Amino acid sequence: MASITLDKLVKQFAGQTVLQSLSLHVPDGAFFTLLGPSGCGKTTLLRCIAGFHEPDAGRILFDRDDVTTTPAHRRDIGMVFQDYALFPDKSAFDNVAYGLRARGVRGDEMRRRVGDALDKVGLHALASRLPAQMSGGQRQRVALARALVIRPRVLLMDEPLSNLDAKMRLQMRDVILDLVREANITTVFVTHDQEEALAMSDQIALMERGAVAQLGSPEALYATPDNAYVADFIGSANVLPVTVTSVDAGGRLRYRFAGCEFDGTPGDGVDRGEARLIARPEELSLTAASPSVANGIEGKVLRRQYLGAKTAYRIAIADAAELRVELPSGHAAGGIQTGAQVQVLIPERSRVVAA
Ligand SMILES: Nc1ncnc2c1ncn2[C@@H]1O[C@H](COP(=O)(O)OP(=O)(O)O)[C@@H](O)[C@H]1O
Ligand SMILES: [Mg+2]
């Protein structure tokens, strides 16, 4: 086990800067996720940590050991790839045994450790199968057993669930979490799937074009996004242009939106002038159109969509803005139908961030 520190990493390919002086700390034993859209540099970053790429500048530390120039095979990492990368001509047993044999572990100890690792991923009975004779989920379990059997200091996983069908993907979340929790191993997990990241991680670094857009717990990223990019990538949000009219030191803020004044909560660095309101659909609520209420704005229900546990409303506001509101089904406002005039309440806790 080890913490991982990335200090101002830069990586370029043919003049294109893919990692832009990126710094991060992954605490010892954490399940840490690199999240972001395709092409933002997740794999490049993971491969730098693994030692498959050498950064052009910056340092990588495992605990206090500087491993920046240490070759991959001496970094003591376990790696799991999206496409499994198993040896096609080796059985599940021999795939898992590979790293142990390479480290000189032989005989009974080797057989015991491989057996244990296959047990833990529920594949004992399939030890002699070749990869081609296993399902995608089973192959990914072999890959996981192979990565963990060597008891690496850190486990690196690059979109390990992306090639699995939806049901297996959910099952494998638990398999992975159970194993890494038991081994108490520092894990860096790459995904482009925000729901997967929220469900699995202790901490998430949301990346944008080779930099960290925001780092925090799943709850923090969801509840207090620093900017519209984060709010939009994690969950869904109404992001609307507003004008901040005052910000005071006590953490209160007033803004104008569609000709009305509202109280809001300031995000980091927001100032008077152009800004963005970030309102999650479930933090808004609806009431009758009159009388008008503080922090309310009039609108018309364009569509009411019953979704089972919740009901979603698309509300048109003056000057062509639209808000999405979600209420638990059975809420007092549940009788509101398409076409109704309503007031949308934007709570004071809704955040206004820099544009
Ligand atoms: N070996 C490489 N040579 C040239 N460009 C690369 C190489 N690997 C990645 N890139 C480029 O770096 C950027 C980030 O890629 P990558 O790290 O794979 O993103 P992600 O894993 O987030 O989808 C992309 O623009 C990609 O084309
Ligand atoms: Mg990738």
Image (cartoon, helix red, strand yellow):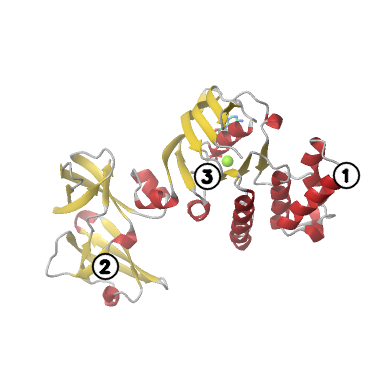
Q: Residues within 10 Å of mark 1 (few under 14, many from 20)?
A: few
Identify the residue position indicated by label 2 in the image: 301
Q: Residues within 10 Å of mark 3 (few under 14, many from 20)?
A: many
Which of pointers 3 and 1 lies earlier in the amino acid sequence?
A: 3
Identify the residue position indicated by label 3 in the image: 32
The CA distance from mark 2 to mark 1 is 71 Å
Q: Is residue 159 left or right of residue 211?
A: right
Q: Is residue 214 visible?
A: yes
Q: Between tags 2 and 3, which lies in front?
A: 3
The residue at 12%/66% (across/down) is: 292
Q: Is residue 135 visible?
A: no
Q: Position of residue 152 (x, y in %)?
A: 67, 40
Which of pointers 2 and 3 lies earlier in the amino acid sequence?
A: 3
Quadrant assignment for the N terminus: top right
Quadrant assignment for the C terminus: top left
Q: Between tags 2 and 1, which lies in front?
A: 1
Query: Going by the picture, which residue comes out furthest to the left?
Result: 291
The CA distance from mark 2 to mark 3 is 41 Å
Amino acid beneath label 3:
Phe
The residue at 41%/72% (across/down) is: 309
Q: Is residue 72 left or right of residue 318?
A: right
Helix, strand or loop for disc 3 = strand
Q: Is residue 163 left or right of residue 26?
A: right
Compared to 51, does 346 lie above or below?
Answer: below
Q: Position of residue 155 (x, y in %)?
A: 63, 42
Quarter of the displayed picture in which ligand 1 can be seen:
top right
Identify the residue position indicated by label 1 in the image: 107
